[in-house]
Structures are given as structure tokens and as C-alpha cells.
Amino acid sequence: MKAFGGKVLFLDRSDINTDEIIPAKYLTEISKEALKPHMLEDLKLEGFNPQDPAVLAAKVLVTRANFGCGSSREHAPWVFEVNDINVVIASSFARIFRQNMFNCGMLAIELPESTIDELFALKADDATIAIDFDKDMLTISSAKGTKTINYRIAEFDKALVKAGGWVEFADSKY
Amino acid sequence: MAMTLAEKIFRSHLRDEPFPGTKVLNIDVVLCHEITTPIAINDLVARGKDRVFDPSKVKVVIDHVTPSKDTKTATQAKILRDWARRQNIRDFFDIGRNGVCHAIFPEKGFIRPGYTVIMGDSHTCTHGAFGAFAAGVGTTDLEVGILKGVCSFRTPETIRVNVNGTLPEGVYAKDVILKVIKHLTVKGATDCVIEFQGEVVKAMSMESRMTLCNMAIEAGGTSGVCMPDEVTVEYLWPFISEEYADKAAAAADYRKWWSDEGCTYKKVLDIDVTNMEPQVTVGFKPDEVKNVSEVVGTPVDQVYIGSCTNGRIEDLRVAAAYLKGKEISPLVRGIVSPATPKIFRQADEEGIIRIFMEAGFCVTNPTCGACLGMSNGVLAPGEVCASTTNRNFNGRMGKGGMVHLMSPAVAAVSALAGKIADPRTFAKETI
């Protein structure tokens, strides 16, 4: 299983699409590693700099609704994976992106909008999120406080994470 | 129990239900292109599982960047080409015979009512126009599809959209789907199938139905679907004539897939198109849609006609009807990409290619090209494109560029005017 948790990157916008996460011009790469320098390169968000050390140090992404909409490109989860971001927390996901995350053994955690607001309320430079995968629990800690939240992911998605991804799961079963 | 079309397909293709709410389906057709497939192929090779579950059910095309523009794209094409050969995949479409995936695969008769279809491409929802369940998936789903012929889905709910009234002059399927996306929003159909019904859809050609279903994903939808009927049979007849005594028998058989009276919909949306204007997007999301009259006069640098949304023969005919005998504004670059070689040839025979060229359009080979800013019409920062494609995301056609989505009719008259224009105020010639 992958390692989950660490420094948080907050992206305060809904409908962040896969073209913003990894522009199509990099889809000519045939290795995941080659995508690494281009994470969130075209993100339209005031004050955001994809090369900011805080962005590069992040391990968990916290964002708003409909994250990962648009293209089916798995390059979107991959560019996070090669940058050591294995968890994305949002109030909702686009279907293909969400499935791609779990298919890669990564975590896409959906929380109600009000809970996402609570996470944003603790936004600070030192914010971290710890994940207790077995208990479906996450704890956010920052200079502004600490909060533990229970989340729910589908049983199937949890099984994919445990198996290490869909190829591993399907290969043993079908 | 009364079921939707999607529920019927799920029932007939169910392989496993590993957990409540998750269904693993047998897949009838796995479609592949050179952008999302090579990494799946390399991974299968690395795992020592370089196999295909059934070569006759895997269809392959090089379409996103073709002919290759550099070493990287040539390598992607080579990986796909070599794999198709060593796996004995007969339906592989290479340079000269290739076209935009969601145009060429239906054209070859690969998609049938009741089928399950996956591809590593979000616009796979297009194929639901045939009464199939067709979903875009990522590379890992594609990889498992190639290896095992299965794919997992959450049981989808269905949103029914009734399109009623009469399409006015200058208003087309593209305008209808933009209006639907405006209503549903970019996330309104997440985990749902969008079912297009109503008298307007019934009267539509397969090309128009594909335009509708193509953009289901822009509302978050898993698949668009239409009920397979006489129009479907007519389109598929060259491929199915041996299976059925006559067309009526085929249409009667296809009825079994229709959503039942009294089935459960998550939501029903009624749209009357009788007084609808042509629609144009204005921002960076496909649900930011306005009436053309509100955006007339917006300057554009490039006009692009093509893509899996609107690069079919009917689209080229519409555009050519406005362009015939005229020249586009010297302020714009016009680019048209017929979506497949068959469409290109047909357009040539009908004099449409000549009309485009005399109007000052650059006619490219069939490719996805400019739509996603990979080749054949990338925008410079600050430039604006009037486009018949499906996505207006920030930077979609090139970093810093802006895209207005619209029908081929609006695109054609915008090319003439050098700014966004209303086709209802332009003369249309017969072709």
C-alpha cells in the first residue's frame, strides 16, 4: 500500500480540470516520471505558483467540488503520484479521475462541503493531514488547531487501495 | 421491473459484483488510441502479461497527433503499431486510413445497440448514440480491459433529457447539447447516464445524436445514450444486413434495449428548442453558455471546424453552405479537419473541400489536432478560437489561449465576419 498523509496543499477552487493538472502537450510522454515538473502548470488560481516550494513539498491536496473534471488522462493522478501526493480530498470528484486514483492505489476522499470548509478554516503554512486508513479517519493539524474527521470510501475502492490498484485486483479475480 | 437502457445493458453484461454498488461488466469493444494506450502496453509487457483478451474486440487508431510531429509522438505511434501487429489486431487504422476515434469507429460499424464500450478517452460517451453504454476510462481501466475484457462501474442512475419542439433555422444538435450542459452544469450528471429522448432526437441523424452524446462528459456524465431505432438501423445496415431479415426486424430487435415505461430516472429535464438561439460558450467551463446574440462581435483569431463533436460530413455540409462563394475575414485563420478519410472523400466528391479552400480555409488530414492543442492549430497566448470542439478549458488549445465552443454554423459565419456572428443573419447556399 502507498504512504498517505503529510503537508497539505489547499486549492480553493471548484471544477479544476485535468488540462490544468497536466496540460495535453505533455501527454506525449511515455513515462510517469517525465510528467513530474509539470504538475498543475496551467492551474487558473490567483496567487498560485506551481514551482512554489510549498507546492512541491505537499503530500495531500485539499480542494473543492468536481475535482479532476474533463479528460480521462490518468496522467493527472500520475503527476500527483510522482510528486508524492497520494491523497486528494474534495467535496466531489469527476468520475474518471476518482476511479483513476483508486485504480492506481491512491486515495480520493469525498467530504461534505461544510467539512471541506472546516479543513480550509485550518489552512496555514504548516498544515498537515494524517490518514488512518484502517479506521477511515483523517486528522488535520496546523497552527490554527487540530481536527479529526471520519470519512467514507466505497468498499470496492478500499479494496483497490489495499490490493495496490485495479490491475492487481482484477488479475487475481478475473 | 421497469428498467432504463443503461440498467438493461448492465444486467446483460454483469460479470461480478465484488461489493454492493460496484459492478464489473464484460466489455464488448475496447477502443484504443496512441495517447493513453502505450503506457498500458508497456505496463503489460513489464508485468509479463503482454496479451489481449480477444483481438477481434480491440479496435485501434492513431488519431491525436498524426502524422507524428516529433520523436515522442512517433514513439507513441510505434508502440501502438508494433503492439497491434504482434497481438494480431486486425482493426488497426494507421496513417492514410486513420481518423478521429469517435468518428471512425462508429463509421466502421464497430458499435452496436446494447454494447459495452470503453476507451482511454473521455469522449467515448459519443458511442452511446447507438444505444450502447460507452464510457471513457483511464489507462489502468483500459489495461485491464485489454487483458481481461472487463471494467468496473458504480451502478449509474439515468438523467432523462426530453428535447421537444422544432429546431429553428441555424440551430443544431451542438446548440442543444450546450443548452443541456448549461442546465445540468459541469458536474450535474456525475456518475449518471444522460438519456436523450423526445421528438427532436427521434428526428436527428446518427451524426447529430453523436454530437449530443459526445458532450455528456462535459456535464460529468458517464455515457450519453439514445434509443436505437430506424435511424440507427439505417446507419448500421451495411454491417448488420446478414443478421436480420430486413430493416424492420432489426429495428424491432433493437427495441428490447429501450428504457421501459415507468423506469426510474434520477431527474427529467424538458427542453423546448422551438425558440432557441444558437449557443456559444464564454468562459473556461463548458456550462458557461450564452445565446449567440449576447456574444456577437467578439473578435476571434482562429476558427476551427472538426473534432469528435463536429467533424462529420453533416457538419462540413452545414459550414460549407454558409461559406460557399465567399471568403473568410483576413483577420482569422480558418482550419477544418474532416474527421475521417471517408468523410474527407465524401466532402471532396460533394465539392465541400473546394468551398472551404476557396473560402481561405486550411484543410488538414483527419486528426484530433487543434482540439486539445497538440498539433495543427495551437493558439498563442492571448489568442481566441471559435471552435466546434467540446472543451473550452483554460489553455486547452494552447497556453494562454481562449476557446469559444459553438456549432459549425456559428463557426463558419464567424470565420466570414472575423468575429462571433449569428448564422441566422447570413445567407445559406445549397451545396
Image: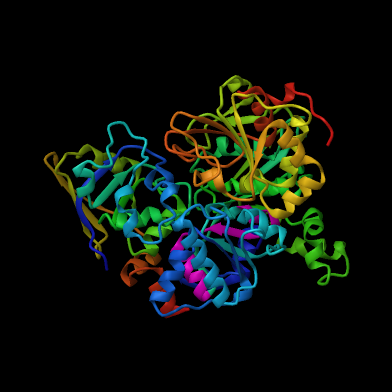
The residue at the far left in this view is: A143
Q: Residue at 77%, 42% (x, y): give it.
A: B199
Numbered disc total:
0
Looking at the rendered image, the quarter that the N terminus of chain A falls into is bottom left
- Identify which residue, A134 or B277, lies in the foreground: B277
In the image, B2: left or right of B295?
right
Q: Is residue B22 visible?
A: no
Q: Is residue A82 above or below residue B171?
A: below
- Identify which residue, B259 or A67, lies in the foreground: A67
Q: Is residue B46 visible?
A: yes
In the image, A19: left or right of A54?
right
Q: Does the magenta portion include B60?
A: no
Q: Is residue B150 above or below residue B393?
A: below
Image quadrant in which you'd find residue B104 = bottom right
Q: Residue at 41%, 51% (x, y): give it.
A: A26
* Magenta residues, dominant SS class: helix
- Highlighted magenta segment, given as a residue range: B126-148
Image quadrant in which you'd find residue A121 = top left
Q: Does the magenta portion include B139?
A: yes
**Residue A131 x/y as whole percent:** 22, 57
**Residue A100 x/y as whole percent:** 41, 59
Q: How is the image coloured?
A: rainbow
- Identify which residue, B192 or A17, lies in the foreground: A17
**Residue B322 x/y as whole percent:** 75, 30
In the image, B318: left or right of B38?
right
Image quadrant in which you'd find residue A132 = bottom left
**Residue B179 x/y as whole percent:** 61, 35
Q: Residue at 31%, 40% (x, y): give it.
A: A114
Q: Is residue A132 above or below residue B344?
A: below
